[in-house]
Image (cartoon, helix red, strand yellow):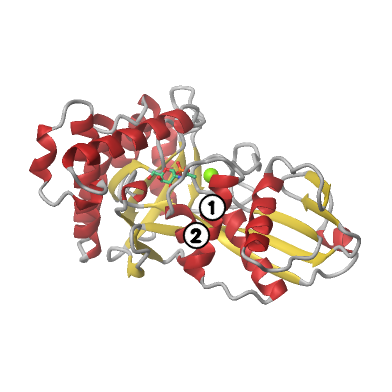
Amino acid sequence: MTSSESFFGGAPDVVASAPGRVNLLGEHTDYNDGFMLPVATPQRTTVAMSPSGDGHFYFQSSTLDSSVDFPENGSAPQGFGSYIEGCIRLVQAGGQKVPALRVFVSTELPVGSGLSSSAALEVATLRALRELIGAELNDVRLARLAQRAEIEYARVNCGIMDQMASSLADSGHMLFIDARSLEHRLVPLPPDAGIIVIDSGVPRKLAGSKYNERRAECEEAARKLGVKSLRDVEDPAAVEQLPEPLRRRARHVVRENLRVLEAVRGVSAERFGQLMNDSHQSLADDYEVSIPELDALVEALRAAPGVYGARLTGAGFGGATVALCRAGEEQQAAQAALTRYNKNGRHGRILIPVQDEKTSQGKENNEPV
Ligand code: NG1
Ligand code: MG
């Protein structure tokens, strides 16, 4: 393991960081030009950089415990290095000069659990680059570049939610995002409510292929309805004429957007919890992206004292769940849900509220995905 100080032989020129995100409401809506409500995670990824001065790029990470070292015109780096390389190349493609660099990454984010460690790495890298070369890049354009890095270099055909959230959200508010216009604003959490995130312990195996399949189904549904995207369906009844499974896919997206629009107008914690429960039901029945473990974990969360509502968060097929609960009772409720869920030999773990290092369980898994 290398420290930042030994890697740079002193202090780096710039240091920047960015959070991950957890989506409270508005799932599978971003690639339909729709609405969503993520919050930033308390955990962050930090990127430090200095010019290397020798024409070579060196990427190193303490938490990821691997290094990449490539000459300016050499072969592309793999793993976490591909995200950094993508950001550098996109900034260069925009006409900015980037010197060969030493880059050091450390992260508090668990990887592959749906907290979007990849978006945090992209946004932190672009923030560091922006500072280092004095690039003019506002936070929305930065999010779009980060999304392109994910699509073109990490080869994940994602929407804009993760990068917008990492670039613009904070952990005390929800960020309302319109994925079409990229208009956004911070909105307060429901009154006296806190957030719990528990990872199901099931890796998101099918997420990639099924994700692309759902995207294609949504595009086909929009085409059949004669709209640009499902965001433009104004009357929810319009989807009922579609053939299956397009009818149910479109119904999820249209109703999910309505749930976000209701939540953003300001609702009680009880109502917000109900909207989360409805969202999960819709993701399970209509969108078919839940699995038995996620359903069981959501049930365990709903049964815990002080919980208003719970749902899967992210693409589904594994990964994490999010719940809203009475403020101040997060730790207790999360523990109760976890105990119940893990009874059947499952390996859930609490991601938020952030555990005390000494009491937290589960092994470190820190490779960005
Ligand atoms: P997750 O599963 O958390 O990585 C994915 C997409 C988002 C969004 C959600 C579903 C990636 C990197 N991100 O999130 O853009 O479409 O699914 O709401 O694929
Ligand atoms: Mg990712």
Q: Report the side of 174 relative to 261 (left or right).
A: right
156 versus 71 height, above or below: above
**Tags 1 and 2 in contact by the CB under 8 Å rule?**
yes
Q: Nearer the viewer, residue 202 or 282?
A: 282
Q: Which image quarter has ligand 1?
A: top left
User: In this view of the protein, can residue 92 be seen by the observer?
Assistant: yes
Q: Nearer the viewer, residue 140 or 162?
A: 140
Which disc number belongs to residue 242? Answer: none
Q: Report the side of 276 relative to 84 (left or right).
A: left
Look at mark 1 in the image and give the residue it sits on: 148
Dot 1 beta carbon under 8 Å from ligand 1: no
Percent across and percent down for residue 312 are: 36, 40
Dot 2 beta carbon under 8 Å from ligand 1: no
Q: Nearer the viewer, residue 60 or 333?
A: 60
Look at mark 2 in the image and give the residue it sits on: 144
Q: Report the side of 278 relative to 202 (left or right).
A: left
Q: Residue furthest top?
A: 344
Image quarter in which the C terminus is found: top right
Element on which disc 2 rests: helix
User: In this view of the protein, can residue 117 be seen by the observer?
Assistant: no
Percent across and percent down for residue 308 are: 26, 50
| Kind of residue indicated by mark 2 | Arg
Tell me the quarter of the picture where residue 300 sits. Answer: top left
Mark 1 surroundings within 10 Å by alpha-carbon count, few (fewer than 14), some (14 through 19), many (20 or more): many
Element on which disc 1 rests: helix
